[in-house]
Amino acid sequence: MSTISPEQFLRHIPLFSACEPAQLARLAEGAVERRVERGQILFQPGDACDGMHVLVVGRVKIVLVARNGQEKVLEIINPGQSFGEAILFLGEPYPVMAQAVEDSLVLFLPASRVLPALEADNRLARRMLAGLSMRLRSLLRDVESYTLHSARQRVVSYFLNTLGDAPSGVVTLPVNKQLLASRLNLTPETFSRLLQKLGEEAGLVVDGRDIRVPDTAALRRLLDTL
Amino acid sequence: MSTISPEQFLRHIPLFSACEPAQLARLAEGAVERRVERGQILFQPGDACDGMHVLVVGRVKIVLVARNGQEKVLEIINPGQSFGEAILFLGEPYPVMAQAVEDSLVLFLPASRVLPALEADNRLARRMLAGLSMRLRSLLRDVESYTLHSARQRVVSYFLNTLGDAPSGVVTLPVNKQLLASRLNLTPETFSRLLQKLGEEAGLVVDGRDIRVPDTAALRRLLDTL
DNA sequence: CGGCCGGAATGACCCGGATCAAGGATTCAG
DNA sequence: CTGAATCCTTGATCCGGGTCATTCCGGCCG
C-alpha cells in the first residue's frame, strides 16, 4: 500500500470526475488518509458524522446493529465507492457501523470541505443527487428482495446480477460465505444448503469462493420455481 | 376540492420553502394539476419518469409490485409530501407504482422545470439533497425492521413512533388495516391477531381505526419481549 | 508433528407467520 | 328492508427458514 495522490484518485471516481478542478483541489487538500486493518471499526451507530468516506484499497462492510447485538450486513463497499455521505446532510449520528473486512485505505473528506464545494460547484451537487438516488434505488431493491422474494430467489438473483447476461461463467464471492449470507439476509446454514440444492437443480459447482454457473438460463428459470 | 394557487402551495412545503422567488414562480408556472379518484393509478413500474409529484389533497400509496402480482406498500404519502423525485435523477423508468387511496389532488412538476431550477438555485439543490437523505434514512429504518425485528416489534414500534413521547394517547390509523398491514410487512390476519394480543398484554383498545394506548411505557417494555 | 481456530457443511428440530377457509360487521345502493 | 361489496376477525394447518449441535476441513503456529 504505497502513498497516493488524493487528488488523482478522486478525479477518477464517478462522483467527483465532473468536478471543477479548483473544487477538486480544495477537497483533496482537506482529505485525510486512514489506514485501517481487518476488523477495525471506522464508525459506529451513534457516532457523530462530520464528513464522508471514499474507499481506496481494501473492503469495508456497512452493518446494521440491533440492540441485542444482532448484525445485518447492508452493503459491501469496494474500492472507488463512497459511503456515509447521506447522513452528512442530516446532521444526525450514524445509524450504521462501518468495519474493515480486509486491511484497507480510506480517504476521509471532512464536511467542512465537502459542503462548501457543493455550494460552489453545482455539477458536483448534481452528481451527488444522482449518487444518492442510485443508493436509494439499490436500497429499494433490497427491500423488494427481503419482502417479496424467497431465500432461494435472493441467492439466484445474486448470481444472475453478478453474471450479467453471460450464458455461463464463474462467480468469485467477494467475501467469505457468512458475510455474503448476511448481506443476502439469510443464515450461513441456509446459504450453504441452498448452494448445495442449486448444484443439483442448476448444475452449480462450488469450489471454495469460486462458483461455476454452467447454464445461466437454467438458473433464471428457477426464479419462478419459488 | 377548490382550485389552488400552485405557487402559494409550493411555498409552504419544506422542499421549496427556501427556494428563490423567481425559481419558485417558474416551477409553479409549469405545474400541472392532476385530479385522481380513489383507486386510480398515477404511474406504474416501467413508466417513463419525466417529472416529480407533490400531493396537495388526499392520500397516495407507493407500492412494490412483484412479477406474480404480489404487492407490498412501501409508503403512504400525505398532503405536502413529494414523491418520485429520486428516479428523476437517474433517467430510469419507475420501479414502483403510485395509486390514489382516496380522491386526491396532485401537482405534477415536469423535469424540464425542476432540473433547471436546481441548476440555478443551490439552496433548492441543498434542500433536495437533504430530502433524498431523509428518504434514504427512512428506507434504512424499514430494512432494519424487516430484517432485525419481529412482526410484533414492528407493530409496537409503529404505535410508539406515532405517539411520540406522550405517556398515553389515541392513534388513529391513516388508512384501512390491510393497507397498514402491508406497510408493516405483514398479512391482515397477523395484524389483526397482534392487535388482539397487544390488547391483552398492554391494554390497547381497538375501536375501528382508533386505537387507544393507555400506557406507552408498558408498550415500550414489550419491545424486548420478542 | 499435533493442537487449535475460523469457516463451512450437515442433520434434527422448532416456531413465527403465511395460507386457506369460514364467518361477522359495516356500509351503501336500490 | 334486502342484497352485495368491502373490511375485519378467527380458527386450523402448513412450511420456509432459523436455531442448536456436531463434525469436518484447511490453514497456521508452537
Image (tube, coloured by chain):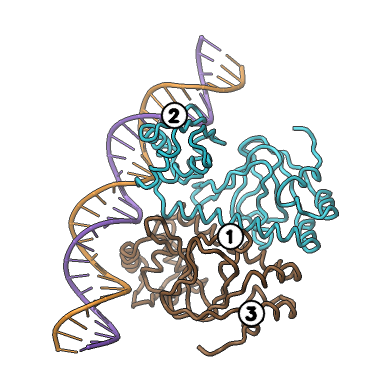
Chain colours: A brown, B cyan, C orange, D purple
Q: CA distance from mark 1 to mark 3?
A: 23 Å
The one nearer the camera, A48 or A224, is: A48
Taking the spot 65% from the left edge, 83% from the top edge, the residue there is: A7
The residue type indicated by label 2 comes to Val
Both labels 1 and 3 in a single chain = yes
Image location (x, y in percent) of residue A217? 45, 67
- Quickly name the residue at label 1: A136
Q: CA distance from mark 3 to mark 2?
A: 57 Å
Looking at the image, is A172 positioned above or below residue B64?
below
- Give the left or right position of residue A185, taking residue A10 as reference: left
Taking the spot 73% from the left edge, 61% from the top edge, the residue there is: B125
In the rendered image, which quarter is residue A20 located in?
Answer: bottom right
Mark 3, other Cα within 10 Å: few <14 / some 14–19 / many ≥20? many
Q: CA distance from mark 2 to mark 1?
A: 37 Å
- Chain where mark 3 sits: A
Looking at the image, is C26 positioned above or below residue B185?
above
The residue type indicated by label 1 comes to Leu
SS state under label 1: helix
Number of the label disc, if any, that sits on residue B205 = 2
State which quarter of the image contains the N terminus of chain B.
Answer: top right
- Give the left or right position of residue A72, taking residue A86 as reference: left
Taking the spot 64% from the left edge, 75% from the top edge, the residue there is: A14
- Quickly name the residue at label 3: A10
In the rendered image, which quarter is residue A84 located in?
Answer: bottom right
Mark 1, other Cα within 10 Å: few <14 / some 14–19 / many ≥20? many
Taking the spot 65% from the left edge, 48% from the top edge, the residue there is: B43
SS state under label 3: helix
The residue type indicated by label 3 comes to Leu
SS state under label 2: strand
Which badge, 1 or 3, comes first in the chain's sequence?
A: 3
The one nearer the camera, D17 or B122, is: B122
